[in-house]
Amino acid sequence: MANLMLNHPTYCYYNPVVGMQNTSDESDEATSHPIDRVPSRVGAAAGPEIVDVDTLAQKVVDDNTAFVVGGLVVEKVRNDVPFYYVGCAYCKKRMIVDDHGNLRCERHACVNGNTYFVVRVCFVESATGRSIWLTLFDQCMAGLLDVGAKDFSLMHESMQMYKLNTLVGTRVSLTIKKSKRNGYNNYNVTHLDVLH
């Protein structure tokens, strides 16, 4: 997987986590620091450690240690690459075109495909001004845009750009699991909350 580097693209995968809810108190929002206004696990004894972007990059951790990075603002969306792809309905791997012009999965040899989001987004940490590029995948983007990848792919290109540009300025917190893979840091975005 990719290495987390500030101001450079970082590729993270989104896996939904059940049981995450935003429990922040609206009355404290005006006076608290943005990184403090992140969701907590309801009913859990101890949630993930709250860190900033620099601390996340420096942490040496065991596999799948979870961290929350709050106070992030969407700065821009990379628009020179596709926003979605057709992938295998079972493993989500990008499908290839075979010799007969049909889409198929290299792993399963199946022809059942779904449309999935793959959007590169630059986030800026409001407290420090540090930026980080992340690739957000299907469920994460569908939640942000209120539209599924299949419906998004059927929109006119100008409408797609409009929807993506409305994300700029959106404040979010991310729950990220950090692990090592092939000598590189891997960052799995497991939950995204929009902060109001």
Image: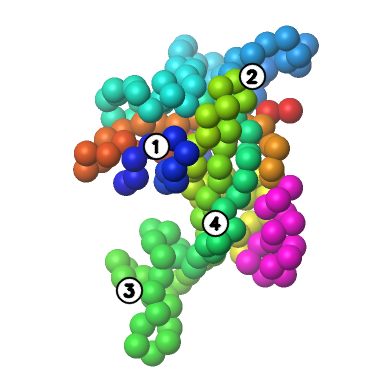
Question: Is there any visible trace of residue 146 in the rendered image?
Answer: no
Of mark 1 and mark 3, the one earlier in the sequence is 1
Is residue 84 found left or right of 168 in the rendered image?
A: left
Spatial CA distance of label 4 from label 1 is 22 Å
**In the drawing, what numbered circle is on residue 117?**
4
The residue indicated by pointer 2 is 34
Closer mark to the observer between disc 3 and disc 2: 2
Q: Position of residue 101 (x, y in %)?
A: 42, 87
Looking at the picture, does residue 108 appear above or below residue 23? Answer: below
Q: Position of residue 179 (x, y in %)?
A: 31, 33
- Is residue 116 one of those drawn in magenta? no
Closer mark to the observer between disc 1 and disc 2: 1
Of mark 3 and mark 2, the one earlier in the sequence is 2
The residue indicated by pointer 1 is 5
Closer mark to the observer between disc 1 and disc 3: 1
Q: Residues within 10 Å of mark 2 (few under 14, many from 20)?
A: many
Instruction: Name which residue type carries label 1.
Output: Met
Q: Secondary structure at mark 3?
A: loop
Closer mark to the observer between disc 2 and disc 4: 2
Question: Is there any visible trace of residue 168 in the rendered image?
Answer: yes
Q: Are marks 4 and 1 in contact (CB under 8 Å)?
A: no
Spatial CA distance of label 1 from label 2 is 22 Å
Q: Secondary structure at mark 1?
A: loop
Spatial CA distance of label 2 from label 4 is 28 Å
State the residue at coordinates (56%, 46%).
121
The residue indicated by pointer 3 is 109
Instruction: Name which residue type carries label 4.
Output: Phe
Q: Are marks 2 and 4 in contact (CB under 8 Å)?
A: no
Q: Position of residue 42 (x, y in %)?
A: 57, 19
